[in-house]
């Protein structure tokens, strides 16, 4: 049976390859087109009025490669792979070689590498040290905060809980990433949970756009439904507070035009012109995977739909905006060892990048696409060009069983594809034959070499793609926290706020003095 399966697979693959171009002229044309494109690249030295920072959580280089093949084949290019400037980011945290999302997001958004599992506080704050996190000098201001100080608008979009590890460094300061609501806080703690910081404190309360999941951490004793269950991994608020209502009250008391939406219909019916502050909470926990998403009126929006709405609200500010967009379900799927889910989520985020490109002008908008960390996804064997990225690569000459193109170095119990048999007093370790399983299913868990509770993060570098003003600042191997500094320079915020205008003023003053000297 296995031999027939291999022969059939190779026969089909051979037919696919025969349809692909392999002649000299094809390769020369590809290279010539790339060369001509490279020769047209010019540095954009304008100020980045707008900045959109896409974070594919867990979207390491192998995920990007697999997404490219999934969407169009080996020679295809994703929207952001056509950006003129590319670099690499070193993702280690202040304490770990292999980082978590809290520390890496904090590095990118605040410009300082920090301890694992801490958010928006420097490395003097150890994990769970509430008192240390309250010291003003330990608290780190984010790109969103500096954008607001410069008169710009700011916001975030995520497919995760809005209080989760990647979005929360935009507005929060906490000694532990799990302190999303009061139920997860240590007894008697003097620190605020992340959800309250988002609604009550600056800059959270002044963010013009907040969209994602996490209702159960915002509304006390939230109830789940079959279509929107409570998330066992997420915090469940129990202090009697309803922070969504508090959000509405705060905006009303300040005379601000705000809208709160909870499903597709409400988002589609949004009155953009009369909405300056938008809160969209679409699920109790994380938003569903794109292939599971209810696209009907009562369902939740895609990452593209949220991105579009966010840009339309934010761009009303003539001074520009900062927007962070997280494709968080890439990471969630990788943690569960389900490569097709992860790659489909990566493809969905690429669609959102294209939406952002369509709604903005490269002349004044810096768009960045990167990741916070890698995962342990591998692309294996020597599969034929043009075959299914989720298919079988070949057969092992040792156990005579097929193996898939994609696998993980680490994985959860479901990806343990080995079992022990005893026959004639001889014990053998046998590998499951993937050709006997539905390997093209979204739920299929690829084989993993090491079994853990869940697939771990990887420690490799991640790519960063950029287009727009000062995109050329991303040009080689960078520290991850460099992103904050390069964006600040490009947008003239933070340490670089009003630098250009002060230079102009200095020039004018010099000219006036020169004229005075000449004519006096």
Image (cartoon, rainbow, N blue to C red):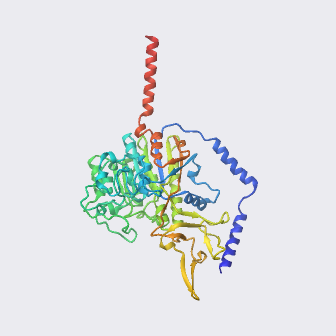
Vertical side of 117 occupied by 135: above or below: above
- Tell me which residue sits at (61%, 54%) in the image: 77
Q: Which residue lies furthest to the front in this view?
A: 425
For the residue pair 434 and 111, the one nearer the viewer reads as 111
x%, y% of residue 432?
57, 77
Q: Is residue 442 visible?
A: no
The quadrant where residue 378 appears: bottom right
- Tell me which residue sits at (31%, 63%) in the image: 184
Q: Which residue lies furthest to the top in this view?
A: 520
x%, y% of residue 205?
32, 49
- Tell me which residue sits at (46%, 17%) in the image: 514
For the residue pair 372 and 220, the one nearer the viewer reads as 372
Vertical side of 520 occupied by 97: above or below: below
x%, y% of residue 227?
40, 69
For the residue pair 179 and 245, the one nearer the viewer reads as 179
Instruction: Count how many numbered circles sit on residues in the image.
Output: 0
The quadrant where residue 484 appears: top left
Q: Which residue lies furthest to the bottom in this view?
A: 424
Quadrant of the image containing the N terminus: bottom right
x%, y% of residue 34?
66, 48
Q: Which residue lies furthest to the right in this view?
A: 24
The quadrant where residue 237 appears: bottom left
> Is residue 509 left or right of 390 when viewed as pictured?
left
Quadrant of the image containing the C terminus: top left
Q: Is residue 9 visible?
A: yes
């Amino acid at each position: 049976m296995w031999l027939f399966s291999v022969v059939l697979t190779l026969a089909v693959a051979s037919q696919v390859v025969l349809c692909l171009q392999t002649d000299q002229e094809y390769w020369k044309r590809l290279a010539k087109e790339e060369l001509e494109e490279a020769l047209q690249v010019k540095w954009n030295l304008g100020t980045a009025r707008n900045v959109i920072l896409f974070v594919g959580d867990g979207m390491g280089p192998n995920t990007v490669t697999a997404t490219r093949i999934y969407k169009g084949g080996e020679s295809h290019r994703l929207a952001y792979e056509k950006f003129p400037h590319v670099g690499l980011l070193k993702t280690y945290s202040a304490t770990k070689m292999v980082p978590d999302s809290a520390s890496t997001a904090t590095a990118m958004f605040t410009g300082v590498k920090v301890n694992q599992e801490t958010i928006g506080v420097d490395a003097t704050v150890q994990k769970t040290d509430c008192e240390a996190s309250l010291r003003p000098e330990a608290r780190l201001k984010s790109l969103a905060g500096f954008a607001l100080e410069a008169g710009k608008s700011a916001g975030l979009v995520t497919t995760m809980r809005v209080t989760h590890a990647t979005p929360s460094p935009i507005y929060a300061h906490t000694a532990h990433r799990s302190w999303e609501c009061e139920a997860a806080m240590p007894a008697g703690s003097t620190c605020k949970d992340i959800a309250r910081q988002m609604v009550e404190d600056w800059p959270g309360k002044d963010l013009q756009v907040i969209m994602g999941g996490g209702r159960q951490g915002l509304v006390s004793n939230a109830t789940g439904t079959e279509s929107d269950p409570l998330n066992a991994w997420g915090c469940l608020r129990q202090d009697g507070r309803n922070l969504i209502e508090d959000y509405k009250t705060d905006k009303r008391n300040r005379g601000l035009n705000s809208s709160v939406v909870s499903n597709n219909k409400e988002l589609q019916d949004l009155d953009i012109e009369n909405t300056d502050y938008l809160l969209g909470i679409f699920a109790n926990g994380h938003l569903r995977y794109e292939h599971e998403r209810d696209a009907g009126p009562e369902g939740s929006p895609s990452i593209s739909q949220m991105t579009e709405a966010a840009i339309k609200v934010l761009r009303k500010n003539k001074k520009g905006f900062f927007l962070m967009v997280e494709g968080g379900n890439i990471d969630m799927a990788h943690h569960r060892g389900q490569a097709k889910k992860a790659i489909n989520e990566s493809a969905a985020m690429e669609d959102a990048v294209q939406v952002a490109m369509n709604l903005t002008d490269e002349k004044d908008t810096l768009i960045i696409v990167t990741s916070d960390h890698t995962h342990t996804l591998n692309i294996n064997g020597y599969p034929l060009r043009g075959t299914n990225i989720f298919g079988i690569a070949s057969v092992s000459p040792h156990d005579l069983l097929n193996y898939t193109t994609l696998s993980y170095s680490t994985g959860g119990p479901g990806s343990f594809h080995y079992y022990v048999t005893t026959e004639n007093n001889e014990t053998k370790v046998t590998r499951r034959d993937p050709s006997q399983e539905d390997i093209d299913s979204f739920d299929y868990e690829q084989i993993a070499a090491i079994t853990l509770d869940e697939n771990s993060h990887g420690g490799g570098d991640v790519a960063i793609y950029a287009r727009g003003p000062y995109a050329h600042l991303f040009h080689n191997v960078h520290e991850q926290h460099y992103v904050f500094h390069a964006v600040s320079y490009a947008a003239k915020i933070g340490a670089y706020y009003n630098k250009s205008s002060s230079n102009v003023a200095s020039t004018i003053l010099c000219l006036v003095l020169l004229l005075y000297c000449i004519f006096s």
